Amino acid sequence: MPARGTDHDTKEIDMKRIGIIGSGAIGSGIARLAVAAGYEVLIANSRGPESLRGLIDELGPQARAGDSREAIEFGEVPVLAVPLGAYEALPGEAFSGKTVLSTGNYYPHRDGRIARLDSLEVSTAELERELLPGAVVTKAFNNILFHHIPALAHSTPRTALAVYGDEDHAKKWVSTIVDDLGFEPVDGGTLAESWRAEPESGAYTPIYAADLDGFIADYLSDPGAPVTADRLRELLAASTRPDVAARQF
């Protein structure tokens, strides 16, 4: 993974380190895969480091707890696994110059109605970029269910995940992380195109279902099934933009 301030293609950092803000199902799932891949991990959440003691004990000596600023500064690519509504409480200036891996989506029942998203004026990722001035925002892990992440990591065939961003070097960094964590990264395009893998699109969570009928009936019981890179590219190309204003969940 390239280091900041150096040639993006030829320089690499000396050690794998990743800071994760958000200790819910997605954040903790990524942390487990990162530790297994040899990363050092620093995790932060809104409740403070003490609330993370159990997770840190589980993850072992490669993991530690901290606050949001420490997580942002810990590695080259901080991971954001928090709701949109939590962005205003983050130390926004600390993200300046950082490549951020956002895993989130817009869910009105949780985030409230956001007119610019409902009107399709911007994608969720484009709005996130505005909320984090100076950051280089990328998207990944936002179209797969939390329990499918550990189930499909290192699958055979290898399961593909879309990576979105406006800067090639940032997508390369994030693709390296996606690959290290056991998935096949697929370049999905720009942040403006990231709707192709948002909720209700043609490349959202049901594509990883082992049985679609069973998934619809009880998605938590679905064990997941691999989606190859070629198949994901087909699904992304055929995806249609959902009616975000009608979204309820």
Image: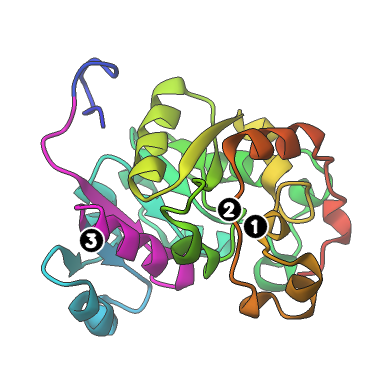
Q: CA distance from mark 1 to mark 3?
A: 29 Å
Label 3 secondary element: strand
Name the image quarter holding residue 44. Answer: bottom left
Q: Is residue 97 above or below residue 63?
A: above
Q: Earlier in the sequence, mark 2 or mark 3?
A: 3
- Magenta residues? 12-40
The tag on residue 42 is: 3
Q: In the displayed image of the protein, which residue is found farthest to the front?
A: 156
Residue 122 makes an appearance in the image: no
Residue 208: which disc? 1
Residue 186: x, y in percent?
A: 54, 34
Can I make out residue 98 in this image?
yes
Residue 212: image quadrant is bottom right
Q: Position of residue 179 (x, y in %)?
A: 38, 41
Answer left or right for 87 relative to 236: left
Label 2 sits on a secondary structure element that is: loop
Q: Is residue 84 left or right of residue 175?
A: right
Q: Are marks 2 and 1 in contact (CB under 8 Å)?
A: yes
Residue in view at x 73 percent, y 72 percent: 215
Q: Is residue 142 left or right of residue 88?
A: right
Q: Is residue 43 magenta?
A: no
Give the mark, 1 or 3, whose residue is nearer the N terminus: 3
Mark 3: few/some/many CA within 10 Å (<14, 14-19, 20+): many
- Pick whichever, 243 or 148, lies toward us: 148
Q: Amino acid at mark 2?
A: Pro
Which residue lies under the disc numbered 2? 226
2 vs 3, front mark: 2
* Mark 3 residue type: Leu
